[in-house]
Amino acid sequence: MNIIPKGALFDAHSTRSDPPTPSGVFRHTAGTQTFGWFAYTLLAVVVPFTSSITSNLLRSLRTLFGLELKLQYFYGFMASPPLHCDKLWHRMWDLIPHPTTQNRLLLVLDDFINPKAGRKTFACSSFFDLAAKANQSSYPWSQNVVSLGLLKWVNGRWTCLPLAFRFYMMEKDSVRKASKMLHFESKMMQAAKMIRDVFDHYKIRVLVATDSWFGNDGLWKRLARGQSGDFHLLSRLRSNNTLYDLPSNPAHKRQGAPRKYGELLGSTEQCAAAYRERAEPVQVHLYGKQREVLAYDRVVTLKTLKCSERVVWVFRKTRFVALFTTELTLSVQQIIAYYGARWKIEFGFKEIKQEIGSAKSQVRNATAVTNHLHFCMMAATLT
C-alpha cells in the first residue's frame, strides 16, 4: 500500500525496525520512534479496520503492522503537543496535484456538530444542532468544528479535501489548553484566518463557497472586502435581502459624493417573481449529471456587502434559489455548478464522523482531541 509519496511527510526509506526520519517537520529530540508511529497511525486511520478511536488505532497498529507498542506510550504519543500539525498541513497542501479550478482555488467553508458523551471532553458545550431530528435534542453536548476544504474535480466528480479546522468555543466557556487560556474567537474570525492561511501558502486567488450563514459581511469585511480581487464569495441569498440596481452615471456632474446604489429593486423574493418569465434553460453539470435548469442572472448591489454582485435565480416548479457571487466574471453555469458542489463538504463530514470514526472517539485531553481530529482529516485528504 503506497499511499504517501516518498519524501512527502517523512522519509519513506524505512522498515518497521527503522522508523521514518523527519523531513523538516519533526525534531530528533522527540525520539525516532514517534516518527514511525505518526506514519503508521495515518495508515491505520485510512485502512477500514474499524472505527478510528484511539484504542482501535492501537489494536490496528499491533495487528496489521506488527508494531509492539505499550499502551501508555501510544496514548502519550496521541496526546503529545510537539506534532507540529500546522507544518504538516502545509506539507499536505503541497501534495495535492493541480489544486486550482480554472485558475482559482475553489474552497468550501462550513461547520459541523460532533456529539460527545464525556462531560469533561475538550471544546464541548451545548451547541444548537440545526439538523437535529424530532427524537433528538436540539442542544446536544457536542463539539462545534469550523472546517475548510478544497473542492477538486477527481475522476469525473467533485470531491472535498479537508485543509484546516478550528474548534469553536462559546465566549462564556473557560477552556485551558497547554496551561494557557484560549482567547475567544468567533466563527467568522476563525474562518477568515484559515482562508488567509491557505491564500498565503498558494498565492492564488480564492473563491469561497459557503452557505448563507457565512456568506455575509461578517466574513467579507474580515477578508478586507476582497483585497483587490484576491478573495471572492459564492453563497446563497436570503429571501428578504434587499437588492439595488447599479448606480447610473449622471450626464451632468452634481454636487456631493457620487451615488453608491441605484434604484431599489425589492427583496430577493419580489425580484424572483418579476424575473421568472425571463428565465432561460441552462445546461449544468449538477449532482453528478448533466441537468437543465431555468435560471436568470443580473448584476446588483447589496448594502450588506457594499459591492457589486452577480445574482442567479434558479427556478423550480414552485420554488426558487437565489445565488450570488462577488466574482462577476463567473458564468451562470459555473455559479450553479460550484454551489452545487458545495454539498460535498457535508458528505466529508459524514465520512469523518461516522466512517473514519471521529464521533466515536472519547479522548478528553485538549491536545489528544485536537491531534485525533488532525489524524482523521489528514487521512481523508491523503486518501
Image (cartoon, rainbow, N blue to C red):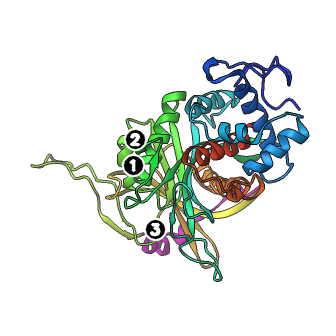
Q: Are marks 2 and 1 in contact (CB under 8 Å)?
A: yes
Q: 63 or 231: nearer the eye?
A: 63
Q: Quadrant of residue 202?
A: top right
Q: Please report the bounds of the magenta region as a residue range.
A: 268-288
Q: Is residue 240 visible?
A: yes
Residue beneath label 1, please? 220
**First in sequence: mark 2 or mark 3?**
2
The answer to whether 34 appears left or right of 183 in the picture is right
- Disc 3: which residue: 238
Residue 258 coordinates in the image, percent (x, y): 19, 48
Identify which residue, 41 or 277, lies in the foreground.
41
Does 252 appear in magenta? no
Q: Is residue 366 above or below residue 66?
A: below
Assign a secondary structure to mark 1: helix
Front residue of this view, candidates 93 and 225: 93
Residue 21 in the image: state x and y as whole percent: 72, 18
Q: Is residue 161 visible?
A: no
Q: Residue furthest bottom?
A: 134
Mark number, residue 378? none
Give the position of the N terminus as an image quadrant: top right
| Secondary element at image label 2 | helix
